Amino acid sequence: MKHLVALDLSSNEIHGQIPHWAGEIGGNELYYLNLSDNFITGLPQFQWYGIENLYLQSNLIEGPFPQSICNMSKLSYLDLSNNRFGGLIPQCFGIISSNLMMIDMANNSFQGTIPNIYRDCGGLIGLSLNGNQLRGEVPSSLSKCQQLEVLDLGNNHLNGTFPSWLDGLPYLRVLLLKSNRFHGHI
């Protein structure tokens, strides 16, 4: 299966860890992978550097953010929501976000702060980090995401004053900041 370009195994009853050899499926030609809605508990080191759409939501995947995702320079859609990922969101998140259109990492156990965005994230239209254990202030570097339409940071432990720079996001349509620890004036 070295020439697969798309693989959808979603909504099955796949259990356990994905074997290491699966990381070689499609080589650099695989651009779409959907393993969502299964019972997957672990992932191999990905070698899918040409992948554009990666859907791993609604599994039982544990452990830190998969570092190999940081090397996916063509990634447009990333959905890791509703798993058991934990630890810190790595700083590479601030770099890969420049190519992504949608990032959904909601309902996991990520901790620490939201990394700064280091590049222009002009294509990012949706960011959901709802339902984690994130702390600190909302980084003002998110103001570089001028196309952002959905920002969901609810149900965390974020603090500080209300991020007033949000008024500079011209396309923002949905903003969820509920159940955090913001204070001061809006």
Image (cartoon, rainbow, N blue to C red):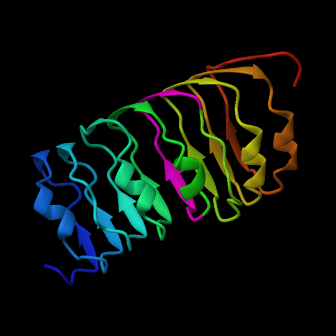
Asked if residue 103 lies in the magenta stretch, the reply is: yes
Seen in the image, is 42 located left or right of residue 81? left
The correct choice, above or below, for 73 with respect to 42 in the image is: below
Asked if residue 109 lies in the magenta stretch, the reply is: yes
Number of labels in the image equals 0
Q: Residue at x 15, y 63 (%)?
A: 22
Q: Residue at x 30, y 43 (%)?
A: 58
Of 145 and 37, the residue lying toward us: 145
Of 126 and 173, the residue lying toward us: 126
Q: Quadrant of the C terminus?
A: top right
Seen in the image, is 156 located left or right of residue 60? right
Query: Start and end of the magenta stretch?
Result: 99-113
Q: Quadrant of the N terminus?
A: bottom left
The correct choice, above or below, for 3 with respect to 150 in the image is: below
Q: Residue at x 11, y 54 (%)?
A: 19
Image spot of residue 106 (x, y percent):
47, 38
Image spot of residue 102 (x, y percent):
54, 57
Image spot of residue 53 (x, y percent):
41, 66
Image spot of residue 155 (x, y percent):
55, 24
Q: Residue at x 12, y 50 (%)?
A: 14
Seen in the image, is 157 located left or right of residue 167? left
**Which corner quadrant of the image does residue 34 belong to?**
bottom left
